[in-house]
Each structure stands twice: as structure tokens, then as C-alpha cells.
Image: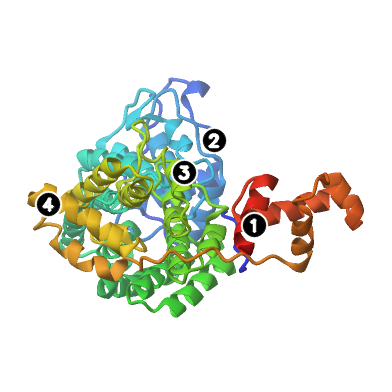
Amino acid sequence: MTPWPRPRGDDHDPAPVVELRRNAPGRPRDPADASPQLGAALRAAAVATSARLVPGRGVPLARHLTVLAECPLPTAPRIWTDAEAVTAAACYSARARRDALSGGADIVRRAFDGVRLIRPAHLSPAARSQLYAAAGEYCSAAGRPQMGARFGAEALLFADTPALRYRALTVMALARALNGEIHAAETTVEEAATLFRDNGWDESEAGYAEIIASGTIAIARMDVENLARVAARLRRTHGGDAYAVFSADALEVGAMMFTRDFSAALAAGRNLLLSGRRRSSHRMLRYLVVSVMSDLLTAHGDYLGALDLLRPYESPDGHGACFAMQRSAALLALGREQELLDGTEECVSADLDHCLRTLVPVLARRAIALLRTGNEKGARESMRMALLLVARNGMSAAPFLMLPRSETASLVDHALRSHPELAEPLAPVRQMLHLVTAGDVRAPSRVVLTPTERELARLLPSRLTTAEIARERGVSSNTVKSQLRSIYRKLEVASRVEAVRRLDEIDD
């Protein structure tokens, strides 16, 4: 089985967008009012980077982004001033653009309660807009597009120049696209693109967030032509940035899947995931490649391979990528419906702020599992909710990828009969089901044990303890335990008793 890795312009700096506030003359600065000093060089990098986060002033320098992403994020000051806002905005954006996301959403929570600053603030509208936009960019990068959209809206509220307005719109567009709000995202992308054209800014200053929002919309629409255009635009406008080039390649892997060029997509996906290039990539684009790869393995009938690929990954806070959802397609094919329901229970809990883009396929896959476990009412309700979200937000048939065709179509048809008002908006989705769903035959799990594992498996029905088996085979107890874990994983069981029962089923 394939081993998979574990997750893990010119140099002239223009004047800053906002003028840094200073203490009143003659008033000594209270150390408690200041964020930790970054040092003169880092503070200069923060000022220059903040200025270049909006179009018309050049693009942020790669070296500035790198050093700001590596430095500790300044703590919230006792009173926010423009100087602190500029520094924090630069650090948030640098971390987002250099995939320095180890702190997750907690980094933003240190300064904000929702989108409200925890500490008092004396900020100009421009500084406030920059701070909110940067926090929104970071949240989307970290897998919390719901919060990203809220910060983007706040940034737009205070944007008092066309450049700041464009910046806020791009943050909102990306967040809405990642959250599956496709209708709203399309409108926001168009507004941002129109503003950019009307102001005559250089193409190289086009917001990365705007371009990735367009790519995310194309993925949701399964629009291969637009995916190709977005990938080409990324290379044209940001070709010198390894992160952007990885993103372009990732979008093309998605296009290969939609054109059913599965072999090429598998090869390209493996190259992206296993090469050193993944170290210069954005989390949500890496997760896109992982998700596509798991779908492709499922399409090829390698259900255990798909689960093995996904095993190291955990969903980020907010489920901008939902690996419980990704596992569910393979679990359905393996007939492990209860495991699917248990694994996605948190996703549908009332207190979890779940990304809509990944919630819809969770609901659709749970519907199939509920149907198979005899809960027909629950199955129909789950599918109804999925279809309502699809119709409301403008999604395509993408949430139904790799689901069993007949069961999916039956539940969709029942929902449309019960809600005839959905028939028209969902007609294109219904027509595409035969293209995105999989066959209805559940392939049996293929269990391949090594010769050593087969020898050990023959001893499992005996009364020998692990220590006695180790002595008999002339190895350590830890070696036997490691081999048992491998056998249990391949048999998809959790205990020796279950393993013996599973081995008997295979022999039969």
C-alpha cells in the first residue's frame, strides 16, 4: 500500500496605508499599552507588508512574509492603536500566506470575541478595516470560512478607499466560496473584479484570495473550463510564488477528476502530496488534493487505501475540510454504516459551527447510512436538508460524488416529490447524479496479510496469551503487539475476538 505523509515586485517599500499613531507629546508610554516589540526590522517589515496588502502599492515581499510568519504574534494591547493594528494585520496575513497555522483559530480568539475586539480601540477606519480583513484571511486559511466571512463583512464596513474595499471583498469572496455560499461568492467575486478593473491596478496585484475564490466556485460547479482559466491566471499573476503554483496544480488535479482522467489525477495528486512541494502550499489546497485522492481511490475500489490515506488527518476547527465526511464514502462501500454515523455525529450536532460546503455531503452520506440501518424517516430528513442547502447556496452535484447511485437517486426523488418547489433549482443537480455517483455494488474488503501476519493469525484462535505467542515465535511481546495492530487494521476490527470472527468469514 502506498505510504502517505502525515499532515503537517521591487524592494522599494511605499508609505503605509495608515499613519501610525503615537503617544501624545510629553506622555510616557505605559508598557502595558504596547504589544511586544518586534524589533525595528520586523516592525518595518510589518508596516511595508500592511501597505502592500491592498492593490496600488505593489505586492508583499516574500522575505517580509517569511519573517513575519515566523515571529510571535503580538498580544492584544491594552488599547488598540493604528500601530498595533498594522502590526497585527501584517502578522495575520503573513501566517495565512505562508501556511503558519499551528495555533489554529485560537490565535484570533486572543484578540477577538467573535468579530469584536476584546480590548478598547482608538482606530482609524482604514486601520480597523485592515485588521479585520487580515483576521478574516487567517480564519479562512485555518479552515474557519464562516468566521472569515464575518471578518470580511466588518472590514468592508470600515473600508474608506477603493483599495481597502477591494481587499475586504476578496476576503469575503474566498470565505463565502470555502463555506459553500456559491451564489453569494459569485456576486462578491464579480464586485471585486469590477472594482479592480475600474481602478486600473496592475494585474500582478490581483488578490490571491479573489483568484482562489474563483477556483473554489469552479470546483463547486464542477466547471472544468473555469478551473483551467483560474490555474492559468494564478501562474500568470503569481508565478513567482511557490504557494500559488501549488494551488494552480491542485485545482488542475480537481479538473482531472471531473473529466474522469483518473490515472492522471492519481499521478499528479501523488506527486503533490509526496514531494517536497507540499511544504510550500496552503493547508486548504493540500486538503483539496487529499480529498480528491481519497475520492479517486474510492472510485477505483481501493476503499482501505482511501481510509489509510485519510487516517492521519483531522478536521480543522470549523470543518473547512471535513475528513469524517471524506471517510464516509469508503465506509459506505465497505458496509460500515454505523461507523459512518458515529464518526459524523459531531458534524451534525447543534453546537458545532460546521462549514456548509462540507456539511452537505455529510448529510447526504448519512442519509444513505440511515436508510441502510432501517431509519427511513431519518434518511429522508437528512437528504431533504442536504438538498435545501444545495438549492439555497447554489451548489452543484459535487456533494454526491462517489455515493451509491440507486439509493441516492431514490432519496433525492422522494425529497423532490415532497418539496416540488425544489424541482426547478435542483434540475441540473438531478441530471448530473448519474455522472458523479458510483455503482451500487459493494465490493468486499480485500484483506492482504503478509506471511508473518498469516502465521500469527493462525494462532489467534488458540488460548495462548500475547506473551506466550511471542515466546513460541521467538520475538518480543512488542513485536507481536505491533503485528496484531497491523492485522486488526487490515481486518477493520478492534479486538482479538473480532479478528478471529472476521478471519472465519474470510475463510468461508
* Amino acid type for the residue under numbered disc 2: Gln
* Amino acid type for the residue under numbered disc 1: Asp
Of callouts 3 and 2, which one flags the residue occurring earlier in the amino acid sequence?
A: 2
Percent position (x, y) of residue 352? 37, 35
Quadrant of the image occupied by residue 475: bottom right
Element at label 4: helix
Quarter of the image containing the N terminus? Answer: bottom right
Residue at which label 1 appears: 504
Element at label 1: helix
CA–CA distance between discs 3 and 2? 45 Å
Q: Are marks 4 and 2 in contact (CB under 8 Å)?
A: no
Residue at which label 4 appears: 417
Residues packed near mark 1 inside 10 Å, few (<14), some (14 to 19) or many (20 plus)? few
Taking the spot 35% from the left edge, 60% from the top edge, the residue there is: 403
Of callouts 4 and 3, which one flags the residue occurring earlier in the amino acid sequence?
A: 3
Taking the spot 24% from the left edge, 41% from the top edge, the residue there is: 153
Mark 3 or mark 2, which is nearer to you? 3
Residue 18 visible in the current orientation: no
Q: Are marks 3 and 2 in contact (CB under 8 Å)?
A: no
Of callouts 1 and 2, which one flags the residue occurring earlier in the amino acid sequence?
A: 2
CA–CA distance between discs 1 and 2? 67 Å
Element at label 2: loop
Residue at which label 2 appears: 37
Percent position (x, y) of residue 192? 20, 56
Percent position (x, y) of residue 35? 49, 31
